Image (spheres, rainbow, N blue to C red):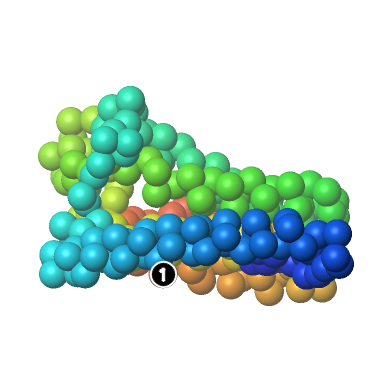
Amino acid sequence: MIRPFRFGAGFAGDCAGPLTAPLVSCRKREECRMQKQVWVAVAVVGALLIGGSFLPVGAQSMAATADMVALTSQKETTLGRRLLMNSIGAHNDIVHDILDGALPMDDLELRGRLQSISAMLYAFPSLYRAEANPYTEEGEKADAAHVSLADKAVWEDFESFKLMSYDAYIKAQEAADAPPEETLARVEELEVICESCHELYRRPFEYFDFDRVEDFIE
């Protein structure tokens, strides 16, 4: 389970006692100075947020800064997204096979695969460029291996897309940390998040369900 970090825990009373009085006074002055800096920073951030709040959602989320400029091309990152998603799917299939009893139970492998899924979900939004490249039939005809499967909605509201990916990242880590009797429930919750994201942000297409392979054999 991912838990929020608590700043200052365990430091109460560190300055108690007569020998530390000068230090307390010094620290008080330092704390006041730091508080002023914090309030200045808060005011600046608040002004920026207020100023940006009147921009369209897409304009706010796509205002790329210099430190967001990537060194890889649109084509490379598009292929990277597809490879990453294929890997997430492969890991998830094995996780389900273990939980369903089709593969031997191996707690270390199960948790390792869920942690890998979590890390990939966190990295996924970073593989999008500011320039939109949603799926097009022309793109698929020109280069099926590198065509984007993303819907234009990704770029229209990138922040919501990114937050959904981060929700999935957290849920996958929760599944990795869960006690054995709760792992399957957490995995199924993760799949609900993933399916919702696919419905909103990815071109629909049919999967070949290997669990139904017998239906296709005459």
Mark 1 crowdedness (10 Å alpha carbons): few <14, some 14-19, many ≥20:
few
> Helix, strand, or loop for circle 1?
helix
- Examine the rendered structure and indicate whether residue 82 appears above or below residue 117: above
Residue 182's image quarter? bottom right
**Could you say where residue 206 lies in the image, as x and y percent from the top left?**
38, 57
**Residue in the image at 51% along x and 51% along y:** 121
Quadrant (top left/top right/bottom left/bottom right) for the N terminus:
bottom right
In front of the other: 178 or 16: 16
Mark 1 highlights which residue?
Answer: 196
The amino acid beneath tag 1 is: Ser
> Which residue is at 66% across, 70% downward?
186
> Could you tell me if residue 203 is visible in this image?
no
Residue occupying the point 71% across, 62% down? 24
Camera-side residue: 60 or 24? 24
Quarter of the rendering containing residue 3: bottom right
Q: How many marks?
A: 1
- Which percent across, then down, holds residue 9? 74, 67
Give left or right: position of 45 versus 107: left
Question: Is residue 47 at all visible to an observer of this figure?
Answer: yes
In the rendered structure, the answer to whether residue 58 lies left or right of residue 115 reads left
Displayed quadrant of residue 202: bottom left
Residue appearing at x 18%, y 42% in the figure: 131
Q: Nearer the viewer, residue 161 or 141?
A: 161
Residue 119 in the image, given as x and y percentages of width and height? 58, 47
Reply above or below: 80 against 39: above
Which x, y percent locates residue 83? 46, 37
